[in-house]
């Protein structure tokens, strides 16, 4: 696997495991292992095949899996506070729409695009919601809070 493929994979894994909602909902390492296994199914085809496009199954595992993961967060939020996170919903739709494109472009480019999109989402959510999330975490950590 090339260095750039490893770097792109590391960025996506870091984005998933260290996203603010992931830390708030379940800080255990077990969650990261589940995400890592799912992600590796999609990235398995990148090993030694970086110049070639992904096949249908790995492309769906990578893009569809991440889209379903984002939609699960949207559904969880809707169930509990009856609001929809539009940014995650739009990103999930973009990932689904990228499926035909992923079958045509090099697999490394697909992973790089996913890494950029997820990083942009996390940076945006951290900047916009970071302070309020921090406040909620500290209130929940206080005795009797």
Image (cartoon, rainbow, N blue to C red):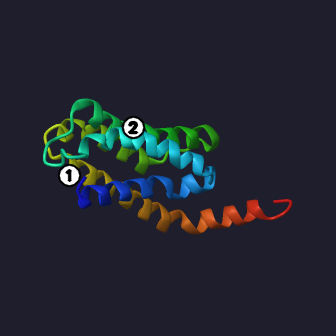
Circle 1 crowding by C-alpha within 10 Å: few under 14, some 14–19, many from 20: some
User: Which numbered disc covers residue 72?
Assistant: none
Tag 1 secondary structure? helix
127 left or right, relative to 3: right
85 left or right, relative to 109: right
Tag 2 secondary structure? helix
- Give how far apart the Cα atoms at labels 1 and 2 are: 17 Å
Q: Residue at x 18, y 48 (%)?
A: 50
As displayed, is residue 131 above or below residue 39?
below
| Residue at which label 2 appears | 65
Name the quadrant containing residue 64: top left
Is residue 70 at least partly visible in the picture? no
Counting from the top left corner in percent of width and height, residue 42 is at: 33, 40
The outermost residue toward the right is 144
Q: Which residue is drawn at 14% across and 43% down?
A: 52
Counting from the top left corner in percent of width and height, residue 69 is at: 45, 40
Is residue 27 at least partly visible in the picture? yes
Counting from the top left corner in percent of width and height, residue 36 is at: 45, 46
Earlier along the polypeptide chain: callout 1 or callout 2? 2
Name the quadrant containing residue 77: top right
Q: Which residue is drawn at 62% across and 50% down?
A: 25
| Residue at which label 1 appears | 109
């Amino acid at each position: 696997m090339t260095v750039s493929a490893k770097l792109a994979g590391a960025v996506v894994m870091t984005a998933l495991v260290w996203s603010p909602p992931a830390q708030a909902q379940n800080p255990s390492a077990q969650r990261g292992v589940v995400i890592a296994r799912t992600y590796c199914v999609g990235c398995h085809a990148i090993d030694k095949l970086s110049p070639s496009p992904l096949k249908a199954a790995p492309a769906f595992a990578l893009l569809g899996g991440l889209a379903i993961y984002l939609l699960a967060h949207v559904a969880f939020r809707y169930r509990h506070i009856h609001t929809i996170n539009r940014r995650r919903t739009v990103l999930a739709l973009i990932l689904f729409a990228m499926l035909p494109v992923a079958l045509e472009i090099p697999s490394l480019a697909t992973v790089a695009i996913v890494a950029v999109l997820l990083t942009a989402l996390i940076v945006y959510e951290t900047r916009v919601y970071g302070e309020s999330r921090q406040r909620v975490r500290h209130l929940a950590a206080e005795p009797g809070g």
